[in-house]
């Protein structure tokens, strides 16, 4: 049986610790996303609500409110031609 040098064991321990930290961060992020989804399901998903809650906006799309405004200003002139296949409304 070949023994690993101490430095190799130390490296493996550090990697394991890093993996555990990443898993904890991912679990926390998933929990935050679940809470955001639950909150958004309880209210209307409209522009003014998203701008009032920039953390929710960031969780949904990764954009800040300012970045969202820039994107929205580019897309808004074409909203009338976008096809929404799941939309059952008249507007």
Image: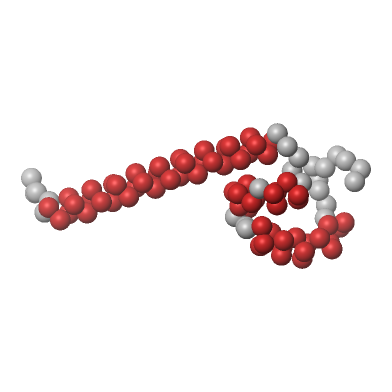
In the picture, which quadrant includes the N terminus? Answer: top left
Place of residue 64 in the rendered image (x, y in percent of width and height, measured from the top left)? 62, 58
Residue at 83% from the left image edge and 52% from the top image edge:
83
Place of residue 70 in the rendered image (x, y in percent of width and height, measured from the top left)? 71, 65
Q: Is residue 84 visible?
A: yes
Side of 31 where 57 appears, left or right? right
Residue at 87% from the left image edge and 56% from the top image edge:
80
Q: Nearer the viewer, residue 20 or 63?
A: 63
Q: Nearer the viewer, residue 86 or 44?
A: 44
Q: How is the image coloured?
A: secondary structure
Q: Residue furthest front?
A: 52
Side of 74 where 9 appears, left or right? left
Residue at 66% from the left image edge and 57% from the top image edge:
65
Side of 25 where 45 appears, left or right? right
Place of residue 21 in the rendered image (x, y in percent of width and height, measured from the top left)? 36, 46
Residue 39: name its quadrant: top right
Place of residue 31 in the rendered image (x, y in percent of width and height, measured from the top left)? 52, 38
Residue at 81% from the left image edge and 45% from the top image edge:
85
């Amino acid at each position: 049986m070949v023994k690993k040098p101490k430095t190799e064991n130390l490296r493996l321990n550090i990697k394991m610790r890093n993996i555990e930290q990443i898993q904890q961060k991912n679990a926390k992020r998933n929990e935050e996303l679940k809470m955001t989804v639950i909150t958004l399901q309880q209210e209307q998903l409209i522009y003014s609500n998203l701008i009032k809650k920039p953390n929710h906006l960031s969780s949904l799309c990764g954009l800040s409110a300012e970045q969202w405004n820039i994107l929205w200003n580019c897309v808004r002139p074409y909203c009338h031609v976008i096809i929404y296949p799941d939309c059952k409304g008249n507007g």
